[in-house]
Amino acid sequence: MRPVYLDNNATTRVDPDVVKSMLPFLTDQFGNPSSAHAFGDSVCAAMKKARRQLQALIGAQFDDEIIFTSGGTESDNAAILSALEATPNRTEIVTSAVEHPAVLTLCAHLEQTRRLKVHRIPVDRSGRLDLDAYKAALTPHVAIVSIMWANNETGTIFPVARLAELAKESGALFHTDAVQAVGKLPMDLKSTAIDMLSLSAHKLHGPKGIGALWIKRGVHFSSMIKGGHQQRDRRAGTENTPGIVGLGMAAELALKFMEDTATRVKSLRDRLEDGILQSIPNTYVTGDPVERLPNTANISFEHTESDGIPHLLSRLGIACSSGSACTSGSMEPSHVLSAMKSPHGAVRFSFARDNSEADVDRVLQVMPAIVEKLRGSPPCGSRGRSPEEARSGLCLSGSRTGCHS
Ligand SMILES: *Cc1c(COP(=O)(O)O)cnc(C)c1O
């Protein structure tokens, strides 16, 4: 049977047109874009084109506001570290409790090593940001606010345009991790008070290891990676030209398919949600019911350990992911679900434009039996391990597999 891929918030399939656009830059067009000869010139021009393609997708005013990085993680790190360097007399960071580890791990590190104060704004049970706590944290001590545009686990969208205006009033810079939002939501950055934005190619059908940081013209930027003069001294190192060209093409395609994502992809997501909620009792959708990415379904199943569902689906060739990790027999809910005080684990199904109705039907066909099976078995940790579990070192109703190399 054809595998069903519903884990597009983890990564997406590279679009064949993206691959096609990249191939010349792995063959004939191998020049260094910094070289002052024809080999460099044509590659330099291709990079310029990629900047324009991205500019159109995010609604940036100028194409030179975009610097290419190795991905979302680097962009997040570069934005926060630059802001701290620009305003050394401001020693506080405002972020949310549900950010990606690319932001939260850096913030925890800065708190420990530089004694900076970090405000982690809580969310409610729907994943909505506590606006009063946010406003209270915005004092003249804050160097930077870093709040994601949309959450990768629940799809909940934060009102970043409004949050950026509030940050501006307090004199803090505003950065947003928009890795999950870019390509799924229309954007017009030039009409907002947002100062910096991170994005990543592999979340929008581009290649891995390439992303970008958009920095509004006029915002001071201090480079995290020191070296040569590439990208106007803002990110040293010879550019990943095939990746950059691929990111540009991925951006162009994302813009072209934006309407399709808002309608057809959303209707696939809704069909899966409705189907599961109707056929399986004691299930509910996690996250903001309205302000939510069109591609993401995060569903809680009461009385099951959520890792069990992705595991059993995986055996049937269906890929999705859970919001929790079962380590040494005990369930650890994700930091996002914990922040939402969600008492149950959840399963994330995330769609993209290459999904079909047949994918939804496959999942709906097998889900009731899987949940019934898991609800019938005692929870992981409260029972002995079966021989198969002992052999694999996994807990079947809550196993965590994956590459830890
Ligand atoms: C995937 C992701 C990242 C990390 O991006 P990489 O390109 O994999 O480093 C950061 N933030 C969010 C919200 C993400 O979903």
Image (cartoon, rainbow, N blue to C red):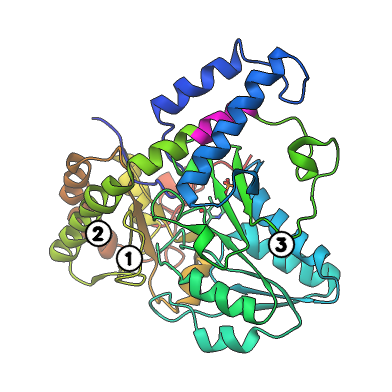
N-terminal of the two: label 3 or label 1? 3
Closest to the observer: 258 or 232?
Answer: 232
Residue identifier under label 3: 80
Q: Could you tell me how far apart the alpha carbons at marks 2 and 3 are, in whole angstroms?
A: 42 Å
Callouts 1 and 2 close, C-beta under 8 Å: yes
At numbered mark 2, what does the secondary structure look like: helix, strand or loop? helix
**Disc 3 within 8 angstroms of ligand 1 (CB):** no
Q: What amino acid is found at the position of numbered circle 1 in the picture?
A: Thr
Q: Residue at x 55, y 15 (%)?
A: 24
Residue 103: quadrant of the picture: bottom right
Q: Name the N-terminal-most of marks 2 and 3.
A: 3
Residue annotated with mark 2:
371
Magenta stretch secondary structure, dominant: helix
Examine the rendering and report whether any part of residue 326 can be seen.
no
Determine whether 62 is above or below 134 in the image.
Answer: above
What percent of the width, then of the height, locates residue 319?
Answer: 35, 43
Of residues 241 and 293, the one drawn nearer to the viewer in this rendering: 241
Q: Which residues are magenta?
A: 241-248
Q: How far, Cα to Cα, is label 3 from label 1?
A: 39 Å
Q: Position of residue 15 (x, y in %)?
A: 40, 30
| Residue 128 in view here | yes
Q: Is residue 330 left or right of residue 138?
A: left
Q: Residues within 10 Å of mark 2 (few under 14, many from 20)?
A: many
Find residue 95 and report its horizontal and vertical position in percent. Answer: 62, 72
**Picture residue at 47% right of the left edge, 32% below the top:** 249
Neighbours of disc 1 within 10 Å: few (<14), some (14-19), many (20+): many
Q: Quadrant of the C terminus?
A: top right
In the foreground, 96 or 186:
186
